[in-house]
């Protein structure tokens, strides 16, 4: 079956604009290849660019066992970080702008130079990284019941919605990234704990895989971008009044709050 990429991109963007969950694409078309899914994701990015948005970075998802088990999808996924999605320091998430958001802790690489595949190694990632910081990503699947298959979630910009990047951080070789600890708390209760190694063994390796994936499509990671390596624990619902905090060893803490406001 021929997939109309522009059609499905507009379908997903309507879900974003109207803050409503839509039926998964695979429920309607049956088989959707991973290539078609990335083509829909690219068409969706193009729609955001036409509205004046720009890229602030890139992301991986489903790089930890915790996330793969939670979402029942067992392969990493790659997506983009829109400039409009980056929250300012202390800026609350406006729940009126989102559908059914969840929060999750992220290891974030701030790039000092470009990274372009193929053959990018974890060592190359460390060389290209200005600093590693803690973050919290707000994900908001556009699909009903936050439920999807691998191609569905790829098409849907890997559920990307907002991101808060911490202000502390370290030079990438100032600590062993695999043993950096993360404690994730919702309203003061611990919901998950993990080390950097939860992300495919090494967060820097995740970024290398992303750079090599992009390289196959003639794309690269740019100096100045933020790159999220994927959540190390499962995601938690973000409701009005929720205070989500990720506490990291070496990287300090990051907090996200949510209010009813917006749109
Ligand atoms: C897909 C996005 C996954 C991560 O860090 O694993 C992701 C989802 O869980 O909805 O961003
Ligand atoms: Mg994430």
Image (cartoon, rainbow, N blue to C red):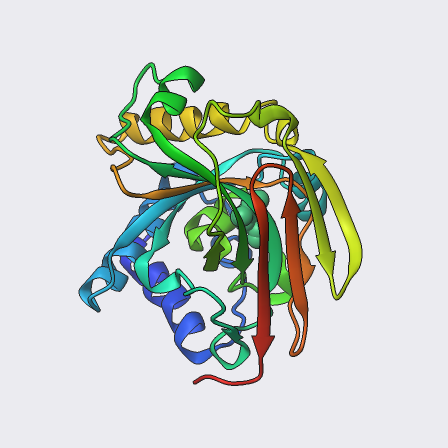
Is residue 146 or residue 135 the one in the foreground?
135
Q: Where is residue 143 in the image (x, y as percent from the top left)?
A: 55, 63
Front in this rendered view, residue 120 or 152: 120
The residue shown at (58%, 34%) is 63
In this picture, residue 158 sits left or right of residue 128: right
- Say which quarter of the image contains residue 8: bottom left
Is residue 2 visible in the rendered structure shown here?
no
Where residue 170 appears, as percent x and y from the top left, is 47, 35
What residue lies at 66% left-to-right and 53% top-to-bottom?
A: 235
Placement of 52 over or under 204, stated as above or below? below
User: Looking at the image, is 93 positioned above or below residue 61?
Assistant: below
Q: In which quarter of the image is residue 145?
A: bottom right
Question: Is 81 positioned to the left or the right of 150 in the image?
Answer: left
Residue 28 drawn above or below residue 192: below
Q: Where is residue 88 in the image (x, y as percent from the top left)?
A: 41, 65
Can the viewer see residue 44 in this picture? Answer: yes
Residue 236, image quadrant: bottom right
């Amino acid at each position: 079956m021929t997939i109309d990429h522009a059609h499905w991109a507009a379908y997903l963007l309507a879900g974003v604009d109207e803050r409503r969950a839509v039926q998964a694409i695979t429920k309607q078309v049956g088989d959707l290849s991973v290539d078609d899914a990335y083509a829909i994701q690219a068409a969706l990015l193009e729609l955001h660019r036409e509205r004046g948005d720009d890229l602030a970075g890139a992301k991986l998802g489903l790089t930890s066992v915790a996330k793969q088990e939670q979402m029942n999808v067992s392969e990493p996924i790659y997506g983009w970080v829109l400039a409009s999605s980056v929250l300012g320091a202390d800026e609350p998430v406006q729940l009126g702008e989102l559908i059914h958001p969840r929060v999750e802790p992220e290891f974030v690489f701030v790039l000092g130079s470009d990274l372009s595949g193929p053959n990018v190694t974890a060592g190359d990632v460390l060389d290209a990284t200005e600093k590693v910081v803690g973050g919290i990503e707000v994900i908001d699947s556009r699909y009903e019941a936050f439920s999807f298959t691998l191609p569905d979630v790829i098409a849907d910009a890997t559920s990307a919605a907002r991101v808060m990047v911490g202000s502390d951080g370290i030079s990438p070789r100032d600590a062993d990234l695999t043993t950096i600890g993360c404690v994730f708390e919702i309203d003061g209760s611990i919901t998950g704990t993990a080390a950097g190694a939860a992300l495919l063994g090494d967060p820097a390796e995740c970024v290398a895989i992303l750079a090599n994936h992009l390289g196959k499509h003639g794309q690269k990671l740019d100096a100045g971008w933020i790159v999220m390596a994927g959540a190390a624990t499962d995601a938690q619902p973000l409701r009005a009044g929720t205070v989500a905090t990720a506490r990291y060893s070496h990287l300090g803490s990051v907090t996200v709050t949510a209010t009813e406001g917006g749109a």
